[in-house]
Image: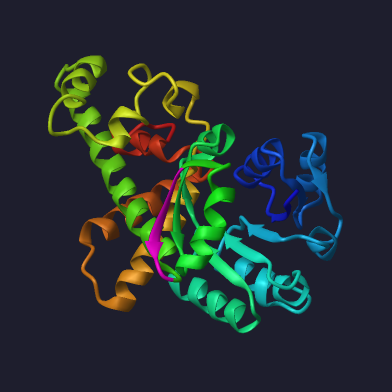
Amino acid sequence: MTRIAFFGLGNMGLPMARNLAAAGFAVVGYDLAERARRRAAEAGLAVADEPTRALEGAEVAITMLPAGPQVREAYLGDGGILDNAREGALLADCSTIDVDTAREVHRAAAAAGFTMVDAPVSGGVAGAEAATLTFMVGGHDEAFARAKPILERMGRAVIHAGGPGTGQAAKICNNMMLGIQMISVCEAFALAERLGLAHEKLFEIASRASGQCWSLTSYCPVPGPVPQAPSNRDYRPGFTAAMMLKDLRLAQETAARVQAATPLGAEAAQLYQLFVAAGNEGLDFSAIIKMIRGDRDR
């Protein structure tokens, strides 16, 4: 039975780790936060009280962490994964981080003799719970071949994006599109409301016309047309506005570094900054329709 050390037991990491355990892997989780460790143990997951104990005998180490600094520390820090992982272990970082950090960790892992992939995900908490995530995987062919059977237990699409760091590149580009599209859908519904066009009718028409996109048909920002969307549960996430802002900032930082023009991405980042600064960081990112409408309680 393959033993997996899983680091990061938050809203995404815990259901991902549980799906691996349900698939028959011997999973031992770890999180810096005692509350997260306790919640994971209550959910039936084996939990270590120290990261080195999670790594004992593990053939695979998976990380699902908030940002680049945490990933760098987890792998490269004194007593980190590269210092303590079993010889020949497969390493998979499923966090969403900047491309430069991903490639730095890849290089260090290769120098230490480990096989590694960067494998950020799309699908949010619902996808993590249902094991329907999309994995965008960066790494060499051998690494992808080793990682794919494991990632498939947590998602329905595992796509090889290319060499080290390209999984993160794909995630940044994808979420920039998502942020822009969500704002466009919110603007359209806000305009339709002013024009007396019912939500259901705009959805019926646009979902079968050229305005169709995932933000409309799978994640509609107004209640009613898509029952599973966060708009039907007071915008409980899903995918928080704070996380969308993080990803849009990553896209802008990366675009500046490579001198790519992303004016709509920049505008989307500014709008989400305003929305988050108004105290909405914990709402689903589709709740930005409140700000676009001009709702007083935004």
Q: Between 199 and 226, which is closer to the camera in this rendering?
A: 226
Q: Outermost residue, bottom direction? A: 111
Main secondary-structure element of the magenta-colored stretch: strand
Task: Please tell me whether residue 39 is drawn above or below residue 225 in the rendered image.
Answer: below
Q: In this rendering, would 161 be left or right of 240?
A: left
Q: Between 13 and 22, which is closer to the camera in this rendering?
A: 22
Task: Please tell me whether residue 158 is drawn above or below residue 255 in the rendered image.
Answer: above
| Quadrant position of residue 59 | bottom right
Task: Please tell me whether residue 139 is drawn above or below residue 293 in the rendered image.
Answer: below
Quick one: quadrant of the C terminus? top left
Task: Please tell me whether residue 2 is drawn above or below residue 192 in the rendered image.
Answer: below
Residue 90 place in picture, x, y as percent: 63, 64
Residues rendered magenta in the picture: 157-163
- Residue 100 visible in the picture: yes
Residue 263 place in picture, x, y as percent: 21, 61
Q: Residue at x 56, y 62 (%)?
A: 67
Q: In this rendering, would 276 be left or right of 22?
A: left
- Residue 248 visible in the picture: no
Asked if the magenta segment contains residue 158, the reply would be: yes
Residue 268 place in picture, x, y as percent: 30, 52
Q: Residue at x 68, y 53 (%)?
A: 8
Q: In this rendering, would 209 be left or right of 34?
A: left
Q: Residue at x 47, y 30 (%)?
A: 235
Q: Between 158 and 200, which is closer to the camera in this rendering?
A: 158
Asked if the magenta segment contains residue 74, the reply would be: no
Q: Between 223 and 24, which is closer to the camera in this rendering?
A: 24
